[in-house]
Amino acid sequence: MALSKFDCKSKKCGPHRPDNEIEDLVDPKVKARMQDMILSNETLRKEQEIYLDNVNRGLKKETNPSAIIKCFPTYVQDLPNRTETGKFLALDLGGTNFRVLLITLADGKCDMQSEIYVIPKEIFTGSGVELFDHIAKCLSEFSTKYGVQEEKIPLGFTFSFPVTQVGLTKGILKKWTKGFKCDDVIGQDAVQYLIDAIKRRSDVDIDVVAILNDTTGTLMACAWIEPYCRIGLIVGTGSNACYYEYQKNAELYDEPDMGSGRIIINLEMGAFGEDGAIDFILTEEDKVVDQNSINPGGQIHEKCVSGMYLGELMRLRTLAMIKEGLIFQGCPNAQESFEKANFTSEIITSIESDHVNTYTNVKAALSKIGISDADPKDMTSLRYVCRCVSRRSAHLVAASLCVLIKKMDEPYTVVAVDGSVYKYHPHYRRVLEEKMKELLSGEDSKYKFKLMLSEDGSGRGAALVAAVAARKQKEQKG
Ligand code: BGC
């Protein structure tokens, strides 16, 4: 998701202070109305128990078929140790922007060139052949631009959708998420689709050596710098996490241990709740967002957490409050404006980037939808709605991360994080960290952790997965 001109990175915003002061300024009636979006630690702990049970069910052969969190083994057993070298191509497909990267690893350094290509909606909701033809075309343009079209470079393919891997180079798509809908690919090997599309063009030659999820890429990219990195998290358009599990617990993993005894598990935790397990935290708006989505009943946790849905949750709740007479009562066109508006999570990032008691971004956001007469009380209320929506997301993510940290039972864990919500929202990181500390209190305070931004992880990680595989092969040969 691109940065909007209001984003926290804009120079105008200045450094962010904690936003807790807003609590005292909000109309008590608005506060009361938002109560259902505020999850107590008790509720979060209840959710954690269910989450852990779901993860364990996903890991076990017997229970996996009916498990909601699928815990896909990734075939990535080893983390990078910085001795990896070579030149790699990476494809990064996981949202409506698609990236091609050329990555060179040498002397412990990672050099990277990349291009972003847009995927038009008619393509990501059309046929798989068209989608992969488009990808192959972009790859060919990239190879020509960077003068590597004559070379056969190993390629890592970051494909950020639920995939059952059958080895490092074969990934069967289980379902699409994040608005994609090329149904013919479901049940098929995404790598084969890519290879076939490249063959159809015959102007580039590539060697696909790995398919991976963006969470795995994120973990690998940080592990290149931080040896204690054990979790990869994405909170962007979609949301998901992976972690470094012991092979003995990953019952679906059937390859020989190459020495680490561990394997990265792609949780696909966005699906959590598809069986109703987290209905107790869902609000009316969550249900409407789900019903109106391209995949009703699917990706329930993701719909509470990720950028694709946060703007809409905020819109729906604000609209409800307008109808109930709680907000924007002095703005005759507010209801109509909120009925028509189409918000992404950028609006939340933008509104919460205002300092408390200043209204620059909120005014700009409202004026875009035709509201120019809101008073400060309304703008504070709107900001509070945004705050509740984004904090609930961070709290739910915190709850899952703490479960994973405790499950791995290591004294210190680095969590690699990427995604537009985490990266650009002015308070998300702090709120996430604070909640994790709260949930890891008492005897769990022995678990220390660090959140680390993994910029470009999904692209760089693809090269690293390919490079680690090459290094291990060399080591095995002796
Ligand atoms: C996908 C995951 C991905 C996540 C973050 C979800 O919708 O199912 O595979 O890791 O989005 O991009």
Image (cartoon, rainbow, N blue to C red):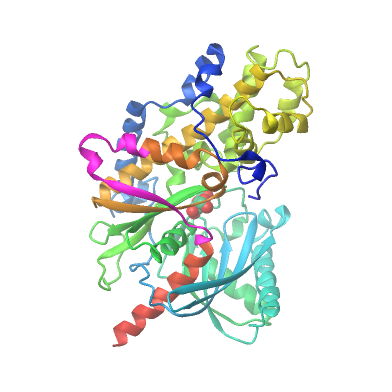
* Residue displayed at 36% across by 45% down: 401
Image quarter (top left, top right, bottom left or bottom right) of the C terminus: bottom left
Residue that sits furthest to the left in the current view: 443
**Residue 169, can we see it?**
no
Q: Quadrant of residue 287?
A: top right
Instruction: State the residue at coordinates (68%, 33%).
Output: 361
Q: Which quadrant would residue 399 be assigned to in this image? A: top left
Labels in figure, total: 0
Residue 446 lies in the magenta stretch:
yes
Question: Magenta stretch: residue 408 in it?
Answer: no
Q: Nearer the viewer, residue 322 or 127?
A: 322
Residue 342 image position (x, y, % from top left): 70, 36
Q: Is residue 417 positioned above or below 330 on the image?
A: below
* Residue at 62% from the left image edge and 18% from the top image edge: 321
| Camera-side residue of 139 and 231 | 231
391 lies above or below 255: above
Residue 428 placement, left or right of 409: right
Residue 197 versus residue 22 in the image, above or below: below
Horizontal and vertical percent for residue 305? 50, 39
Answer whether residue 434 is visible to the viewer in this image: yes
Question: Where does the magenta region start and end?
Answer: 436-457
Relative to residue 162, is residue 5 depicted above or below?
Answer: above
Coordinates of residue 129 in the picture (x, y in percent) = 65, 66
Q: Is residue 242 left or right of residue 379?
A: left
Query: In the image, is 113 to the left or to the right of 442?
Result: right
